[in-house]
Image: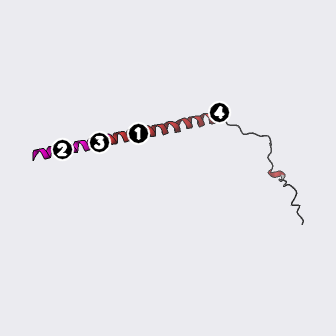
Amino acid sequence: MKFDTNAPYKVPAEYEPKNKNFEPKTKPTSVIMIILGGIIVCTITVAAIIGIIIGANMAYKAIRDTIEHTDTHLEEDVNKV
């Protein structure tokens, strides 16, 4: 059996597409779901970023107030002695 290696490959007829000019189309409901999904993801991302900023600010204030509160107690203890 001899093979011609210079000949282009011929796909068997059973594997060729039935409709060669077919272009898949996205349904309108799928487009709406994709857009809504994008909006939801963006909203969650923005909310997470804002939450991180607010949480870090609150943590900073709590730590600062704790340090200031501790410093005033130490000064009062020293003045009592």
Amino acid at circle 1: Ile
The Cα–Cα distance between marks 4 and 1, rounded to whole angstroms, is 38 Å
Q: Is residue 45 left or right of residue 25?
A: left
Magenta region includes residue 62: yes
Question: Which residue does the numbered mark 1 point to in the structure image?
Answer: 53
Residue range of the region highlighted in magenta in the rendering = 61-81
User: Counting other residues with Cα less than 10 Å from the Cα at mark 2, is it few (<14), some (14-19), or many (20 or more)?
Assistant: few
First in sequence: mark 3 vs mark 1: 1
Question: Which residue does the numbered mark 3 point to in the structure image?
Answer: 64
First in sequence: mark 4 vs mark 1: 4
The Cα–Cα distance between marks 3 and 1, rounded to whole angstroms, is 16 Å
- Residue 29 x/y as whole percent: 62, 34
Question: Which residue does the numbered mark 2 point to in the structure image?
Answer: 73
Question: Which residue does the numbered mark 4 point to in the structure image?
Answer: 28
The Cα–Cα distance between marks 2 and 3, rounded to whole angstroms, is 14 Å
Amino acid at circle 2: His
Q: Which quarter of the rendering shows the N terminus? A: bottom right
Q: Secondary structure at mark 2?
A: helix
Q: Secondary structure at mark 4?
A: helix
Q: Secondary structure at mark 1?
A: helix
